[in-house]
Image (cartoon, helix red, strand yellow):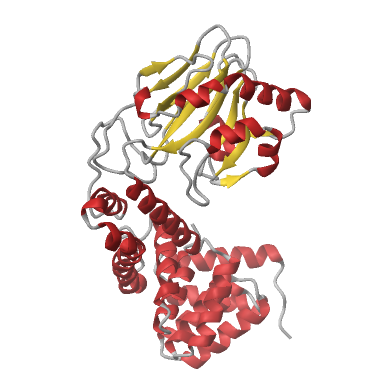
Amino acid sequence: MTEQFPAADAAALRASAFALANQGRMLEAERAFSDLLRGSPGDADALNFLAVCAHGRGRADEAMELLLQARQANPGDAATLVNLGSLQRERERLDDAQAAFAEAVRLAPDIPAARLRLAEVLEARGSLRDALPMYFGAIMAAQKRNAWLSDETTEPALRPLVMHAMRVVDSGRRALFTGLLAPLREMHGDLALRRVGRCLATYLGELRPAYADPAQRPTFLYMPDLPSTRFFERDLFPWYGAMEAQTDAIRAEMQAVFTADGSGFEPFFGHFDDKNARIEDHLRNDRGDTPVWDAFFFYRHGVRYDANAVRCPITAAALDATPLCRIREHAPEVCFSVLTPGSHILPHRGVTNTRVVTHLPLVVPEGDLVLNVSGEPMHWHEGRCFSFDDTFEHEAWNRSDETRVVLLFDVWNPHLTPVERDALTTLIGGIGDFNRAAGL
């Protein structure tokens, strides 16, 4: 009868076995894991290690039996599934291998090897369309952990497959995104899409970004050959006058929703794409109070907030008359932007210079209130629009004693042609679809 180890003893033996393996003392590690397995039947680490050892000696059946034991005892262990799928792939059991890798990805989406192996099986089955984003997601997840950046940061056993994945990704993304633009290219010609082509090549890393101003650094997509300026001339926006004429009515709608019960307002901080970002990295209060940057959204990440639009019909109609940058699931961002006394939006950059941010100031108290765009300050004036390129580092603060409110909205960069707008709408939407399929 097998004597069960107390949990503490099992943990100590497991740690000792891993330490031996890390020192390259593989036979001693194997004996230690065998001892662990005798006292802890079903231990996933022991079964997986012993399976790898058996496989290395050419005993594939023994390895399979050990992995199946591990799977039965630990159905939620992703590492077991990866090893099991690898052995099934080796035996050309593609259905079983795909199922094992897919379950590993579901259980542990942050394990790059699981995504890599699943992609390889999908490609082997002729599903390159599905394999491509899976390869890309695996590479991005690994490189985020500083792995797969070189031979030294890639496990020897994975190097050939990682190199293959990178080749597939390089050629596959280029073909995919170029294909999305093909109908527009056929309709309008290469010249009309020249800048978009350079934009795509820059995004794919084929061209180094040729920033016209070193202070400009989009976090996502750079459109080259656009005039580079922090603030734009008013005559580029002929619709300013109509928007400004609605200032009093828009302000009244804002005050009505703000003073009613505050419903509809939420922290603007959720706008940031980095889900791991800390609020203190982006927002503080210079007086030591709680910083507040709130928003009443009409659009967020391109999704219309219908209930808020119904509550502010004049504002919604005025916005609909502007060239909002409309890209599904990406743009525009449109809101009443509220910054309380002492609150300071810290320096940051926007995602792309293909759109610009416009402010219609609604409530501007007396005092020190500034939007500083890469060293160039702008002071808000109620009822007077301005637009700026937020891919330049910028910050804003309210050092007055009252709350500041502006209507903030994204419009297309006025230097883009209608064809370029259509192409960018298609391209960015396609990039979003691809990245979502990649698990990013």
x, y (%) of residue 411? 44, 37
Residue depicted at 54% across the width and 7% down the height: 367
- Quadrant location of the N terminus? bottom right
Residue 323 horizontal/vertical position (percent): 45, 38
Residue at 30% in and 44% down: 223
Please name whichever residue, 332 or 64, is drawn nearer the observer in this view of the structure. Answer: 332
Residue 45 in view of the camera: no
Quadrant assignment, res 301: top right
Q: Residue furthest right?
A: 261
Residue at 52% x, 90% y: name it. Answer: 62
Picture layout, residue 131 above or below residue 409: below
Q: Does residue 158 sit above or below 199 in this rendering?
A: below
Q: Is residue 174 left or right of residue 103?
A: left
Q: Residue furthest top?
A: 366
Q: Nearer the viewer, residue 31 or 170?
A: 170
Residue 23, how many percent across, how many down?
41, 65
